[in-house]
Image (spheres, rainbow, N blue to C red):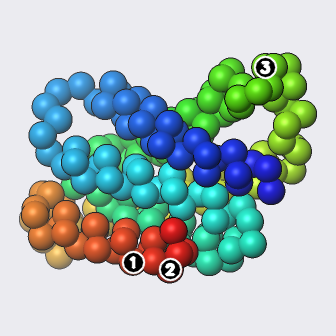
Amino acid sequence: MRLKRWIASQESTIAARWYQELMAASPGPRDDGTTLLRSVVTHLVSFIPPCLGEQRERGLEVWQQATHLYGSLAVRRGLAAGEVVEELQLLRNVVLRLFLVDAPPGLAPEATVEFIPPLELLALNRVLDVGVVRASIAYVDDLFFAHLQGSGVPGEITQELVEEMEHQLQGFKKDLKL
């Protein structure tokens, strides 16, 4: 798939732009979990290409698990339920803007649309939609259980949590042989 190859070639740019947009959208102190957030963002972007190719089933499974982690992290970062959705929509905007406005190398902007078949763009949208749903579910579940089982306030981002999430993300990467 052409889109898979293009996204794989643009992973670092997509991740960097998405992270910049996340930081720009969240005013205030940024010392709470931003290193973990940067890592999660980078991993999430790297998990998109496998969702679009031969490893599609395994890729989608990992994508769902990884976006679930993203939703859980959103609760601990103190986001509102809609904000986790907005953050993943920023990812969609970054990818589409990079693709449509900043044409792939060697192509004139008007040729960009012809570069990728529309069905591949629809497949990407489905992948991103699945991520939004999984992150939202994780957010609501974690918030519900914090209220049901605890003080009503989700736990903070601890070094233990950072290590556990990093371990899970590395496991996902191994599963996809990235």
Q: Nearer the viewer, residue 66 or 76?
A: 66
Q: What secondary structure is marked by label 3?
A: helix
> Toward the viewer: 85 or 51?
51
Kindly identify the amino acid type of the residue bearing the numbered disc 3: Pro
- Res. 146 image quadrant: bottom left
Asked whether 16 or 159 is in front, the reply is 16
Disc with the residue nearer the chain's start (2 vs 3): 3
- For badge 1, the amino acid type reads Gly
- Return the mark for residue 171: 1
Q: Nearer the viewer, residue 101 or 122?
A: 101
Question: x, y percentage for residue 48?
Answer: 59, 57
Residue at x 64%, y 65% (from the top left corner): 50
Q: CA distance from mark 1 to mark 2?
A: 6 Å
Q: Secondary structure at mark 1?
A: helix
Disc 2 to disc 3, C-alpha distance: 36 Å
The picture places residue 82, in percent across and down from the top left corner, at 43, 42
Which residue lies at the image location 28% right of the left edge and 68% below the top edge?
165
- Provide the secondary structure element on which disc 2 rests: helix
Q: Position of residue 58 (x, y in %)?
A: 62, 77
Q: CA distance from mark 3 to mark 1?
A: 38 Å
In the shown orientation, is residue 117 left or right of residue 13?
Answer: right
Residue type at mark 2: give it.
Answer: Asp
